[in-house]
Amino acid sequence: MKKYVNILKENGIKVTPQRLEIMKYLDEHMTHPDVEKIYSDLKKKNPALSKTTVYNTLEILRKYNIVQVLTISESELRYDFKNTLHHHFLCKSCGKIIDIDVECPKLNKMLKGKYKVDEVHGYFKGICNVCRGKRKTVTNN
Amino acid sequence: MKKYVNILKENGIKVTPQRLEIMKYLDEHMTHPDVEKIYSDLKKKNPALSKTTVYNTLEILRKYNIVQVLTISESELRYDFKNTLHHHFLCKSCGKIIDIDVECPKLNKMLKGKYKVDEVHGYFKGICNVCRGKRKTVTNN
DNA sequence: TTTCAGTTTGTAATCATTTCAATGTAACAC
DNA sequence: GTGTTACATTGAAATGATTACAAACTGAAA
Protein backbone atom coordinates (compact mmCIF):
# COMPACT_ATOMS: atom_id res chain seq x y z
CA MET A 1 0.00 0.00 0.00
CA LYS A 2 2.95 2.31 0.64
CA LYS A 3 3.45 2.50 -3.13
CA TYR A 4 0.06 4.10 -3.60
CA VAL A 5 0.42 6.39 -0.59
CA ASN A 6 3.62 7.70 -2.10
CA ILE A 7 2.07 8.30 -5.50
CA LEU A 8 -0.75 10.29 -3.94
CA LYS A 9 1.59 12.32 -1.71
CA GLU A 10 3.95 13.07 -4.59
CA ASN A 11 1.01 14.55 -6.43
CA GLY A 12 -0.32 16.45 -3.43
CA ILE A 13 -3.52 14.41 -3.36
CA LYS A 14 -5.06 13.68 0.03
CA VAL A 15 -4.66 10.03 1.04
CA THR A 16 -7.91 8.15 1.78
CA PRO A 17 -8.63 4.41 2.11
CA GLN A 18 -11.01 4.52 -0.86
CA ARG A 19 -8.38 6.05 -3.14
CA LEU A 20 -5.79 3.49 -2.07
CA GLU A 21 -8.15 0.57 -2.69
CA ILE A 22 -9.07 1.82 -6.15
CA MET A 23 -5.44 2.35 -7.10
CA LYS A 24 -4.48 -1.09 -5.82
CA TYR A 25 -7.35 -2.65 -7.70
CA LEU A 26 -6.40 -1.03 -10.99
CA ASP A 27 -2.71 -1.81 -10.55
CA GLU A 28 -3.36 -5.47 -9.81
CA HIS A 29 -6.11 -6.07 -12.38
CA MET A 30 -4.92 -5.81 -15.96
CA THR A 31 -8.47 -6.45 -17.14
CA HIS A 32 -9.29 -2.86 -18.15
CA PRO A 33 -12.39 -2.75 -15.93
CA ASP A 34 -15.21 -0.26 -16.32
CA VAL A 35 -16.66 1.78 -13.44
CA GLU A 36 -19.35 -0.79 -12.65
CA LYS A 37 -16.80 -3.61 -12.37
CA ILE A 38 -14.48 -1.61 -10.12
CA TYR A 39 -17.40 -0.55 -7.97
CA SER A 40 -19.02 -3.96 -7.56
CA ASP A 41 -15.73 -5.72 -6.84
CA LEU A 42 -14.59 -3.20 -4.25
CA LYS A 43 -18.02 -3.05 -2.64
CA LYS A 44 -17.51 -6.64 -1.50
CA LYS A 45 -14.70 -5.53 0.81
CA ASN A 46 -16.22 -2.19 1.69
CA PRO A 47 -20.04 -2.26 1.48
CA ALA A 48 -20.25 1.44 2.33
CA LEU A 49 -18.42 2.41 -0.84
CA SER A 50 -20.33 4.84 -3.03
CA LYS A 51 -20.23 4.74 -6.79
CA THR A 52 -19.81 8.50 -6.76
CA THR A 53 -16.52 7.97 -4.92
CA VAL A 54 -15.35 5.65 -7.68
CA TYR A 55 -16.21 8.29 -10.26
CA ASN A 56 -14.55 11.05 -8.24
CA THR A 57 -11.42 9.03 -7.59
CA LEU A 58 -10.98 7.92 -11.19
CA GLU A 59 -11.44 11.52 -12.25
CA ILE A 60 -8.69 12.81 -9.96
CA LEU A 61 -6.31 9.94 -10.76
CA ARG A 62 -6.82 10.56 -14.44
CA LYS A 63 -6.25 14.29 -14.00
CA TYR A 64 -2.87 13.57 -12.41
CA ASN A 65 -1.99 11.04 -15.08
CA ILE A 66 -1.89 8.11 -12.65
CA VAL A 67 -4.52 6.11 -14.49
CA GLN A 68 -5.60 6.36 -18.10
CA VAL A 69 -8.99 6.06 -19.69
CA LEU A 70 -9.46 3.67 -22.57
CA THR A 71 -12.11 4.75 -25.05
CA ILE A 72 -11.65 1.65 -27.17
CA SER A 73 -15.20 0.51 -26.50
CA GLU A 74 -18.01 2.59 -27.93
CA SER A 75 -20.32 2.07 -25.00
CA GLU A 76 -18.17 2.23 -21.88
CA LEU A 77 -15.04 3.82 -20.53
CA ARG A 78 -12.40 1.47 -19.18
CA TYR A 79 -9.55 2.22 -16.82
CA ASP A 80 -5.90 1.23 -16.74
CA PHE A 81 -3.17 1.88 -14.19
CA LYS A 82 -0.58 3.83 -16.16
CA ASN A 83 2.59 1.77 -15.76
CA THR A 84 4.00 1.34 -19.25
CA LEU A 85 3.01 2.63 -22.67
CA HIS A 86 1.18 -0.07 -24.56
CA HIS A 87 -1.63 -0.34 -27.06
CA HIS A 88 -4.85 -2.32 -27.08
CA PHE A 89 -6.61 -4.86 -29.24
CA LEU A 90 -10.37 -5.33 -28.83
CA CYS A 91 -11.78 -8.63 -30.00
CA LYS A 92 -15.20 -7.91 -31.47
CA SER A 93 -16.23 -11.49 -30.90
CA CYS A 94 -15.43 -12.18 -27.25
CA GLY A 95 -15.08 -8.54 -26.16
CA LYS A 96 -11.70 -9.13 -24.54
CA ILE A 97 -9.11 -6.35 -24.60
CA ILE A 98 -5.56 -7.56 -25.13
CA ASP A 99 -2.46 -5.46 -24.40
CA ILE A 100 -0.18 -4.86 -27.39
CA ASP A 101 3.42 -4.13 -26.43
CA VAL A 102 4.76 -2.91 -29.76
CA GLU A 103 5.58 0.73 -30.28
CA CYS A 104 5.90 2.97 -33.29
CA PRO A 105 8.73 5.45 -32.69
CA LYS A 106 8.42 6.88 -36.19
CA LEU A 107 4.88 8.09 -35.63
CA ASN A 108 5.56 9.31 -32.11
CA LYS A 109 8.62 11.33 -33.15
CA MET A 110 6.86 12.92 -36.09
CA LEU A 111 4.03 14.02 -33.81
CA LYS A 112 6.26 15.26 -31.03
CA GLY A 113 7.91 17.64 -33.44
CA LYS A 114 4.58 19.19 -34.34
CA TYR A 115 2.43 18.93 -31.24
CA LYS A 116 2.76 18.58 -27.49
CA VAL A 117 1.66 14.96 -27.14
CA ASP A 118 0.46 13.86 -23.70
CA GLU A 119 -1.36 10.66 -24.58
CA VAL A 120 -0.82 8.00 -27.22
CA HIS A 121 -3.58 5.48 -27.77
CA GLY A 122 -3.32 2.72 -30.34
CA TYR A 123 -6.60 0.84 -30.65
CA PHE A 124 -6.94 -2.16 -32.91
CA LYS A 125 -10.19 -4.01 -33.40
CA GLY A 126 -10.93 -7.34 -35.00
CA ILE A 127 -10.97 -11.01 -34.10
CA CYS A 128 -8.46 -12.61 -31.75
CA ASN A 129 -6.75 -15.94 -32.46
CA VAL A 130 -8.90 -17.86 -30.01
CA CYS A 131 -12.15 -16.69 -31.58
CA ARG A 132 -10.81 -17.23 -35.10
CA GLY A 133 -10.31 -20.87 -34.17
CA LYS A 134 -13.78 -21.10 -32.71
CA ARG A 135 -15.46 -19.27 -35.63
CA LYS A 136 -17.84 -17.54 -33.28
CA THR A 137 -20.49 -15.03 -34.31
CA VAL A 138 -19.20 -11.49 -34.64
CA THR A 139 -20.93 -8.79 -32.63
CA ASN A 140 -20.86 -5.10 -33.38
CA ASN A 141 -18.68 -3.55 -30.81
CA MET B 1 -25.58 11.90 -54.91
CA LYS B 2 -25.04 8.98 -57.29
CA LYS B 3 -21.86 8.12 -55.38
CA TYR B 4 -23.85 7.47 -52.21
CA VAL B 5 -26.63 5.62 -54.02
CA ASN B 6 -24.00 3.28 -55.43
CA ILE B 7 -22.36 2.66 -52.08
CA LEU B 8 -25.71 1.75 -50.54
CA LYS B 9 -26.71 -0.51 -53.46
CA GLU B 10 -23.35 -2.27 -53.47
CA ASN B 11 -23.96 -3.14 -49.84
CA GLY B 12 -27.57 -4.17 -50.36
CA ILE B 13 -28.85 -1.34 -48.17
CA LYS B 14 -32.15 0.25 -49.13
CA VAL B 15 -31.74 3.77 -50.54
CA THR B 16 -33.58 6.55 -48.69
CA PRO B 17 -33.21 10.34 -48.81
CA GLN B 18 -32.25 10.46 -45.14
CA ARG B 19 -29.43 7.98 -45.61
CA LEU B 20 -28.11 9.86 -48.64
CA GLU B 21 -28.15 13.17 -46.80
CA ILE B 22 -26.30 11.76 -43.81
CA MET B 23 -23.66 10.13 -46.03
CA LYS B 24 -23.19 13.32 -48.02
CA TYR B 25 -22.90 15.32 -44.83
CA LEU B 26 -20.23 13.05 -43.38
CA ASP B 27 -18.31 12.86 -46.64
CA GLU B 28 -18.24 16.64 -47.06
CA HIS B 29 -17.59 17.59 -43.44
CA MET B 30 -14.20 16.50 -42.17
CA THR B 31 -15.09 17.90 -38.76
CA HIS B 32 -15.75 14.58 -37.02
CA PRO B 33 -19.24 15.64 -35.91
CA ASP B 34 -21.19 13.98 -33.12
CA VAL B 35 -24.81 12.86 -33.45
CA GLU B 36 -26.21 16.14 -32.17
CA LYS B 37 -24.24 18.17 -34.72
CA ILE B 38 -25.25 15.94 -37.64
CA TYR B 39 -28.87 16.04 -36.51
CA SER B 40 -29.14 19.77 -35.94
CA ASP B 41 -27.39 20.66 -39.20
CA LEU B 42 -29.48 18.31 -41.33
CA LYS B 43 -32.69 19.33 -39.59
CA LYS B 44 -32.31 22.79 -41.16
CA LYS B 45 -32.85 21.30 -44.62
CA ASN B 46 -35.31 18.64 -43.51
CA PRO B 47 -37.23 19.71 -40.39
CA ALA B 48 -39.04 16.37 -40.25
CA LEU B 49 -35.80 14.51 -39.61
CA SER B 50 -35.83 12.42 -36.47
CA LYS B 51 -32.80 11.96 -34.27
CA THR B 52 -33.63 8.27 -34.10
CA THR B 53 -33.09 8.12 -37.85
CA VAL B 54 -29.65 9.62 -37.43
CA TYR B 55 -28.82 6.96 -34.85
CA ASN B 56 -30.25 4.17 -37.00
CA THR B 57 -28.46 5.33 -40.12
CA LEU B 58 -25.10 5.76 -38.43
CA GLU B 59 -25.50 2.30 -36.96
CA ILE B 60 -26.14 0.65 -40.32
CA LEU B 61 -23.38 2.63 -42.09
CA ARG B 62 -20.98 1.65 -39.36
CA LYS B 63 -22.01 -1.99 -39.59
CA TYR B 64 -21.17 -2.00 -43.29
CA ASN B 65 -17.88 -0.21 -42.70
CA ILE B 66 -18.94 2.88 -44.66
CA VAL B 67 -18.40 5.25 -41.75
CA GLN B 68 -16.25 4.80 -38.69
CA VAL B 69 -16.83 5.80 -35.10
CA LEU B 70 -14.16 7.80 -33.32
CA THR B 71 -14.00 7.16 -29.59
CA ILE B 72 -11.22 9.69 -29.11
CA SER B 73 -13.42 11.85 -26.90
CA GLU B 74 -14.43 10.44 -23.54
CA SER B 75 -17.86 11.96 -23.56
CA GLU B 76 -19.17 11.65 -27.11
CA LEU B 77 -18.91 9.46 -30.16
CA ARG B 78 -17.85 11.16 -33.35
CA TYR B 79 -18.32 10.01 -36.93
CA ASP B 80 -16.07 9.93 -39.96
CA PHE B 81 -16.73 8.95 -43.57
CA LYS B 82 -14.28 6.09 -44.13
CA ASN B 83 -12.27 7.24 -47.14
CA THR B 84 -8.62 6.77 -46.20
CA LEU B 85 -6.86 5.34 -43.19
CA HIS B 86 -5.66 8.14 -40.98
CA HIS B 87 -5.17 8.84 -37.30
CA HIS B 88 -6.40 11.61 -35.05
CA PHE B 89 -4.99 14.21 -32.72
CA LEU B 90 -7.28 15.73 -30.09
CA CYS B 91 -6.24 19.11 -28.74
CA LYS B 92 -7.18 19.17 -25.06
CA SER B 93 -7.21 22.94 -25.09
CA CYS B 94 -9.44 23.86 -28.02
CA GLY B 95 -11.10 20.45 -28.45
CA LYS B 96 -10.33 20.33 -32.14
CA ILE B 97 -9.64 16.94 -33.76
CA ILE B 98 -6.89 17.04 -36.40
CA ASP B 99 -6.32 14.30 -38.99
CA ILE B 100 -2.88 12.69 -38.89
CA ASP B 101 -1.84 11.14 -42.19
CA VAL B 102 1.18 9.16 -41.05
CA GLU B 103 1.05 5.39 -40.89
CA CYS B 104 2.99 2.77 -39.02
CA PRO B 105 3.40 -0.29 -41.27
CA LYS B 106 5.57 -2.06 -38.70
CA LEU B 107 2.84 -2.15 -36.09
CA ASN B 108 0.12 -3.02 -38.57
CA LYS B 109 2.04 -5.91 -40.06
CA MET B 110 2.95 -7.36 -36.69
CA LEU B 111 -0.69 -7.31 -35.69
CA LYS B 112 -1.99 -8.72 -38.95
CA GLY B 113 0.17 -11.78 -38.45
CA LYS B 114 -1.40 -12.45 -35.09
CA TYR B 115 -4.96 -11.18 -35.32
CA LYS B 116 -7.62 -10.42 -37.89
CA VAL B 117 -7.51 -6.63 -37.73
CA ASP B 118 -10.58 -4.77 -39.03
CA GLU B 119 -10.01 -1.34 -37.52
CA VAL B 120 -6.90 0.66 -36.71
CA HIS B 121 -7.31 3.76 -34.56
CA GLY B 122 -4.39 5.95 -33.58
CA TYR B 123 -5.44 8.60 -31.08
CA PHE B 124 -3.03 11.23 -29.86
CA LYS B 125 -3.95 13.83 -27.28
CA GLY B 126 -2.21 16.96 -26.20
CA ILE B 127 -1.92 20.60 -27.22
CA CYS B 128 -1.93 21.74 -30.83
CA ASN B 129 0.49 24.34 -32.22
CA VAL B 130 -2.10 27.10 -32.28
CA CYS B 131 -2.99 26.65 -28.61
CA ARG B 132 0.65 26.32 -27.62
CA GLY B 133 1.20 29.76 -29.06
CA LYS B 134 -1.80 31.16 -27.26
CA ARG B 135 -0.95 29.45 -23.94
CA LYS B 136 -4.61 28.83 -23.24
CA THR B 137 -5.97 27.03 -20.20
CA VAL B 138 -5.94 23.27 -20.51
CA THR B 139 -9.19 21.44 -19.98
CA ASN B 140 -9.53 17.79 -19.01
CA ASN B 141 -10.72 16.01 -22.07
C1' DT C 1 -50.93 0.41 -59.02
C1' DT C 2 -50.55 -2.59 -55.47
C1' DT C 3 -48.20 -4.79 -51.98
C1' DC C 4 -45.12 -5.40 -48.18
C1' DA C 5 -40.87 -5.53 -45.88
C1' DG C 6 -38.14 -2.33 -44.19
C1' DT C 7 -37.76 2.70 -42.69
C1' DT C 8 -38.91 6.85 -40.36
C1' DT C 9 -40.87 9.26 -36.76
C1' DG C 10 -41.93 10.81 -32.00
C1' DT C 11 -42.63 9.40 -27.50
C1' DA C 12 -41.36 6.94 -23.64
C1' DA C 13 -38.04 4.12 -21.14
C1' DT C 14 -33.35 3.19 -19.85
C1' DC C 15 -29.10 3.77 -17.81
C1' DA C 16 -24.56 5.76 -17.15
C1' DT C 17 -22.89 9.88 -15.32
C1' DT C 18 -23.23 14.27 -12.73
C1' DT C 19 -24.97 17.34 -9.23
C1' DC C 20 -25.75 18.45 -4.67
C1' DA C 21 -26.24 18.80 0.32
C1' DA C 22 -25.39 16.49 4.54
C1' DT C 23 -22.10 13.85 7.04
C1' DG C 24 -17.50 12.21 7.84
C1' DT C 25 -12.44 12.41 8.06
C1' DA C 26 -7.31 13.40 6.83
C1' DA C 27 -3.95 16.60 7.79
C1' DC C 28 -2.03 20.20 10.14
C1' DA C 29 -1.23 23.43 14.06
C1' DC C 30 -1.05 23.81 18.69
C1' DG D 1 -3.15 14.06 21.73
C1' DT D 2 -6.97 17.50 20.56
C1' DG D 3 -9.28 20.78 17.84
C1' DT D 4 -10.07 22.83 13.53
C1' DT D 5 -10.98 23.07 8.82
C1' DA D 6 -10.84 22.13 4.18
C1' DC D 7 -11.60 18.41 1.55
C1' DA D 8 -13.74 13.66 0.73
C1' DT D 9 -17.47 10.44 0.95
C1' DT D 10 -22.07 9.18 0.69
C1' DG D 11 -26.75 8.53 -1.26
C1' DA D 12 -30.53 10.59 -3.39
C1' DA D 13 -32.07 13.17 -7.12
C1' DA D 14 -31.31 15.32 -11.70
C1' DT D 15 -29.47 15.09 -16.23
C1' DG D 16 -28.89 13.77 -20.78
C1' DA D 17 -27.43 10.66 -24.32
C1' DT D 18 -28.97 6.46 -26.27
C1' DT D 19 -32.37 2.77 -27.05
C1' DA D 20 -36.95 0.60 -27.47
C1' DC D 21 -41.22 0.68 -29.39
C1' DA D 22 -45.49 1.18 -32.07
C1' DA D 23 -47.80 3.67 -35.60
C1' DA D 24 -47.42 5.82 -40.01
C1' DC D 25 -44.83 5.96 -44.18
C1' DT D 26 -42.24 4.62 -48.38
C1' DG D 27 -38.85 2.34 -51.70
C1' DA D 28 -38.70 -1.36 -54.71
C1' DA D 29 -40.39 -4.96 -57.31
C1' DA D 30 -44.25 -7.33 -59.46
Image (cartoon, coloured by chain):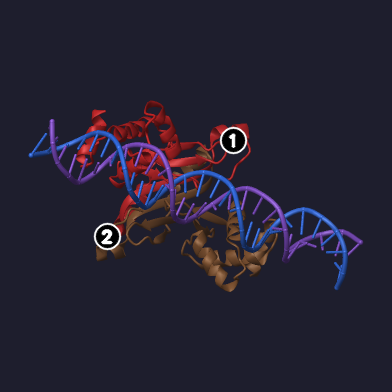
Chain colours: A brown, B red, C purple, D blue
- Pointer 2 indicates a residue of which chain? A
Of A7 and A60, the residue lying toward us: A60
Q: Position of residue B32 (x, y in %)?
A: 42, 37
- Pointer 1 indicates a residue of which chain? B
Label 1's element? helix
Q: Position of residue B12 (x, y in %)?
A: 20, 42
Of B26 and A115, the residue lying toward us: B26
Q: Position of residue B66 (x, y in %)?
A: 30, 41
Asked if badges 2 and 1 are on one and the same chain, I answer no
Disc 1 designates what residue?
Answer: B132
Amino acid type indicated by mark 2: Thr
Q: The N terminus of chain B lies in which quarter of the figure?
A: top left
Label 2's element? loop
Disc 2 designates what residue?
Answer: A137
Q: With A98 as the anchor, is B112 left or right in this view?
A: left
Looking at the image, can residue A86 be seen?
no
**Above/below status of C29 relative to B137:** below
Q: Residues within 10 Å of mark 1 (few under 14, many from 20)?
A: some
Q: Position of residue D1 (x, y in %)?
A: 85, 73
Query: Number of callouts in the render?
Result: 2
